[in-house]
Amino acid sequence: MNWRKLLAFGMAAVMTAALVSGCGSDKAKDGGSSDGKKIVVGLDDNFPPMGFKDENNEIVGFDIDLAKEASKRLGREVEFKAIDWSSKEAELKSGRVDILWNGLDITEKRKENMLFSDPYMDNRQIIFVKKGTTGISDEKSLAGKVVGTQSAGTAEEYMDKSDFFKKDVKEVKKYSDYVSAFMDLENGRIDAVVGDEITGRYYMSKHADSIEAVDAVVGEVSEFGIAFRKDNQQLRDEVQKVLNEMKADGTIAKISEKWFGKDITKK
């Protein structure tokens, strides 16, 4: 009787070990890419024209069109997931999203925690003011002013490190998105917005009577890229391959023309 119990116990232990091993194998596969698996794209859904909700509450934009076409070529379903952009690295690292694809600047600091695609567009930080404003012509003329920008963006990173913005600018107000910053600018609550030229000019095109751009670069010119988890080299390479194909066959240029009126992507 005892040997039978021991045999049954031993068989159960072997089966349990096999199941655990199998689960571990599946998890290992999930760490990378697998054919047919849905790609979850994390984005700030109030960041026009890269990714935002239109009047029908649908997520649209330049990066959205790029991601849809890339996923189609990969034979993969894509899901767009709005996230708190200030927590984007945590969302990516935790696996709640597979990709950050929403006008994300490539920086050395971000490279420490993310894999990036090749850059696909240049991005300048410039100054926007209420139409008719005088006396603001460059970065130094922001002394004594209240300046707005989006939290967790490249402009914020630059201003946080700048002695000029710390000492000479009256206040730097940080917003959850650029749309809120521009609304405060229109209403006279702040003197200027420093932010992404692409987003600002798109907003300005819809509010031409109230906003204008000061064509002066603040900080360094940066580049947009797509971010992946550090351990997801396979997905990064798969997406980069189809992006290269889209560039070669003119698809990216057509999408750029749709949103910007011309091809402004990197050649």
Image (cartoon, rainbow, N blue to C red):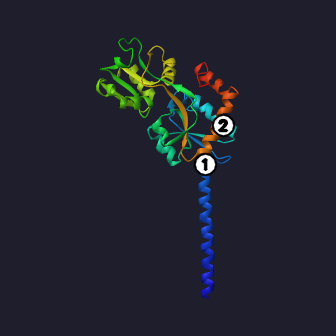
Residue 120 position (above or below residue 139): below
Label 1: element kind: loop
Q: In which quadrant of the rendered view does residue 138 lie?
A: top left
Image quarter hosting the C terminus: top right
- Checking the image for residue 195, the label placed there is none
* Residue at image coords 64%, 47%: 37
Q: Earlier in the sequence, mark 2 or mark 1?
A: 1
Q: Could you say which is closer to the camera, residue 234 or residue 27?
A: 234
Q: Amino acid at mark 2?
A: Lys
Q: Amino acid at mark 1?
A: Gly
Instruction: Locate residue 134, reporting x and y percent.
Output: 36, 11
Instruction: Locate residue 55, reporting x and y percent.
Output: 55, 28
Image quarter hosting the N terminus: bottom right
Label 2: element kind: helix
* Residue at image coords 63%, 47%: 33
Cβ atoms at labels 2 and 1 below 8 Å apart: no
